[in-house]
């Protein structure tokens, strides 16, 4: 193992044990830094120059989209801050580099509300028509997952990580550990959603108690995000819905629907677990139906008689 590889290994260990970063962030850092190490010709960190970093960044722009480039640069930049902090290097070559590029705004994709209704109705119907006990249980679990995604705007990773102790159906709330291990509590306001979650918990109580996670698969283990994606694709296809639906689109639909219903954006920020209001403000660009309604019904031009 050369010096650069060794320092990257030390840094990742530092991120895990000292900074307490979550597994997904560590995985992204590991991938980004392995790519960086593969592109840099020198094996000694003190020999890495600003010019080498500029060439590396130029190569990233040719290979990846701006959002990915931004993340990969941040990963490498963090490594050099660590090396400077640990006095492995005297001068940080990143200090002479000013990286500025415009990242195109990608508007969140939402699901039309009538499509959400069709989607859910199709799963409820599958539950009614199920011929075996397992088919009934699986449909019930799928309903519970989708209802909770749509009712709370929870991230799929947060949903999969829910422990049985995080879900309080008596209090009608769920405790979520979001990005950066930030805690937030979300109330479940709909009676039917609570009812479905209670039915699901009763049907899967043995499996839930066995593994400790609230959502479980057929093997009694935690329901994975890939399994949920496959489940959504399956029900989308059986409901003859042409739109490609992802779990995150339920989160976007949740936020946009509340914004269109005149809910204060700061409440939405809190429910989504966004660290900054600027992240939540992306939804103001999506809520165009509400804008059209306001201008059609409230603008004084409608009362003109010409």
Image (tube, rainbow, N blue to C red):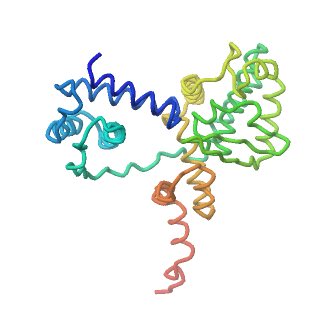
Give the quadrant of residue 145. Answer: top right
Residue 174 relative to residue 57: left or right: right
Nearer-the-camera pick, 235 or 27 = 27
Residue 43 relative to residue 238: left or right: left
Q: Position of residue 132 (x, y in %)?
A: 77, 13
Residue at 78% from the left image edge and 35% from the top image edge? 196
Residue found at the very far left of the displayed protein: 51
* Quadrant showing the N terminus: top left
Residue at 27% from the left image edge and 25% from the top image edge? 4
Is residue 84 shown above or below 205? below
Q: Position of residue 126 (x, y in %)?
A: 71, 25
Q: Position of residue 45 (x, y in %)?
A: 24, 31
Nearer-the-camera pick, 273 or 115 = 273
Q: Position of residue 245 (x, y in %)?
A: 52, 35
Residue 194 relative to residue 225: left or right: right
Residue at 61% from the left image edge and 54% from the top image edge? 270
Is residue 248 shown above or below 138? below
Give the quadrant of residue 257. Answer: bottom right
Q: How many numbered circles are shown?
A: 0
Residue at 68% from the left image edge and 33% from the top image edge? 162
Is residue 89 shown above or below 254? above
Give the quadrant of residue 36. Answer: top left
Residue 104 relative to residue 61: left or right: right
């Amino acid at each position: 193992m050369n010096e650069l590889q060794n320092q990257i290994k030390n840094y990742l260990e530092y991120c895990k044990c000292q900074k307490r970063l979550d597994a997904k962030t560590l995985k992204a850092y590991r991938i980004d830094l392995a790519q960086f190490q593969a592109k840099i010709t020198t094996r000694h960190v003190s020999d890495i120059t600003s010019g080498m970093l500029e060439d590396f960044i130029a190569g990233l722009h040719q290979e990846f989209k701006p959002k990915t480039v931004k993340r990969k640069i941040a990963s490498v930049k963090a490594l050099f801050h660590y090396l400077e902090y640990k006095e492995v290097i005297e001068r940080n070559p990143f200090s002479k580099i000013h990286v500025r590029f415009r990242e195109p705004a990608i508007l969140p994709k939402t699901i039309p509300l009538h499509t959400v209704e069709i989607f859910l109705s199709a799963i409820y119907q599958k539950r009614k028509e199920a011929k075996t006990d397992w088919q009934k249980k699986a449909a019930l679990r799928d309903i519970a997952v989708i209802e909770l995604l749509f009712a709370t705007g929870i991230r799929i990773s947060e949903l999969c990580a829910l422990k049985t102790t995080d879900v309080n159906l008596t209090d009608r709330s769920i405790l979520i550990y979001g990005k950066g291990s930030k805690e937030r509590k979300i109330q479940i306001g709909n009676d039917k959603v609570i009812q479905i979650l209670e039915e699901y918990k009763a049907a899967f109580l043995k499996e839930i108690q066995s593994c400790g996670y609230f959502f479980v698969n057929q093997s009694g283990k935690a329901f994975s995000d890939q399994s949920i994606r496959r489940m959504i694709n399956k029900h989308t296809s059986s409901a003859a819905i042409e739109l490609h639906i992802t779990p995150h689109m339920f989160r976007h639909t949740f936020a946009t629907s509340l914004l269109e219903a005149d809910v204060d954006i700061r409440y939405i920020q809190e429910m989504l677990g966004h660290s900054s209001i600027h992240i939540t403000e992306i939804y103001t660009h999506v809520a165009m139906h509400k804008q059209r309604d306001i201008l059609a019904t409230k603008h004084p031009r409608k009362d003109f008689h010409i």
